Image: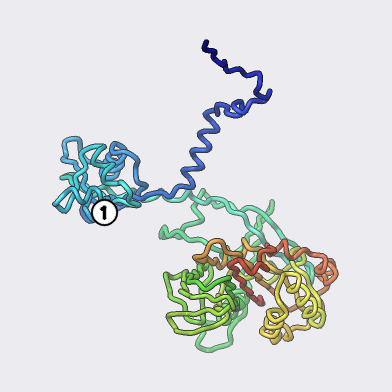
Amino acid sequence: MFSSRRSTSASLPSQSFWGKFKKKDKESEFRERQAQMALARQRLLTLAYEDMETVRVLPNSFPELEAVARDWTKPPPDAIFGLRVPVEFASLHASRLVSGPYIYLTGEDSYQIAIMGVQGLRVEIVSDAPPPPDEPPPPPPPPVTEMPATFNLELVPGQHVVLETTVASADDVDMARMEDGTVVDGQFWGKLNIVHDGGTHTVDFTGTRIVNPDVPPDMLFDSRVMSKLTTAAKPSSVKCHLSILSPAQQYCDVILSVNPLWRLELTWPPAQPVNETKVKYFLRVHPGGALEHFESEMVTTSLYYEAVPDPAMVDPNDFIAPRNGYAMSFRDFVPHLMSVLDQLGMSMHARTNFINNNISAFSAHKNIAYRFLSPSKIAAAIDISVTSDPCVFTRLFLIFRGLSDDDVGLFAGAGEKEANSVNWREIVGWSENSKDTTQFRLLETSVFEVS
């Protein structure tokens, strides 16, 4: 007699293992698919037609490829249109099956065979259509008929007020263009006309008359313009030291990019220029901090470079003010700075070198006002990229200026006591990983004196 054992759920726990497999909704599946696509390495497509080329993301199917190619070339409906791939760019499987220099794509099968296992594909367009039209120029910017204006007025000696208003053009004239139509931007010196009911009051140009027989007697020089020319003749520069600490010997590229309002004056060892605003170092870094620069065949412990900002944008009273900086005497400033650098994780050797390299500039002033910049403000002026991932960046950018005894009074609520209570680690973006010897670390110290 045969007996059969029936399966039953009586012996299974109440919370069944199979109950964990729930059907996912479409939204969660779409998010997972998008995340996987973001992590996947995108393959690129180079489209070539005559002497023109363009780069796109490689389509997944032949109809998508043909649509991309037609959208770029925009051939007439009756024009000959074909696609081919040079055998050296196609997959190994496809190139072994043809004896000619090209693989002509005629459908989905030939396309999938051509892209099998390749990271990028070059597709040449065969057509008798005219070349793709040039992209139309961007539309001109809208006219500027209003702009904000700030006037610093001295009512009586020592009493200043700031007037913030809006300047409007007469008859809707574009204030961003000169008489010949040239578009200009920047800051301008001008003439202020204050109009009241019942009369017009004009603030005329003021300057200094030059005593010289060769100069016309009615020629004047604005003292504000002369002060800017003096500043431009002797611009202040930012002095930067860049050290790299690597857990193991490795090669890396260090790329310095400056804002168009800045320019690199000096690099040592000499960096390789990439363009007007970018230079590059090719280095071999060692765990002890040594940097081998191959182009100059030098070994150093840090890279040095100087950058100069546009003098027109440097306003000492705006760069360091009671709202963003702190002031104290020179005798108090140096010990205070040593304590701040200690909080920011610098070794005693690094702190000593930092002070010794700048003590001459510090000692030239009886009183000093200073601040440290945040990483975002530093990167907006001088950006650094390194071909090592991950990399721990520590960038310390000190701005300071000298103060007279009278100017120190303006920093009554921003002295040494207030500076000691500031969380400088949060301001400069300091991380505990900067002390981790197993991490690839970069330390930059920069000093900028504004005057």
Give the left or right position of residue 364, taking residue 267 as reference.
right
At mark 1, the secondary structure is loop
Dot 1: few (<14), some (14–19), or many (≥20) neighbours within 10 Å? some
Residue type at mark 1 is Phe
Q: Would residue 123 be seen by someone viewing this image from the given angle? A: yes
Q: Quadrant of the C terminus?
A: bottom right
Residue found at x 20% / y 35%: 77
Check the image and tell me how it is coloured.
rainbow
Closest to the observer: 231 or 156?
A: 231
Give the left or right position of residue 267, taking residue 288 as reference.
left
Farthest residue to the top: give it: 1
Closest to the observer: 437 or 102?
A: 437
Residue found at x 52% / y 65%: 388
Closest to the observer: 436 or 325?
A: 436
Closest to the observer: 94 or 385?
A: 94
Which quadrant would residue 411 be assigned to in this image?
Answer: bottom right
Q: Would residue 226 be seen by someone viewing this image from the given angle? A: no
> In the rendered image, which residue does mark 1 sit on?
89
Farthest residue to the bottom: give it: 213
Q: Position of residue 335 (x, y in %)?
A: 80, 79
Give the left or right position of residue 413, taking residue 400 as reference.
right
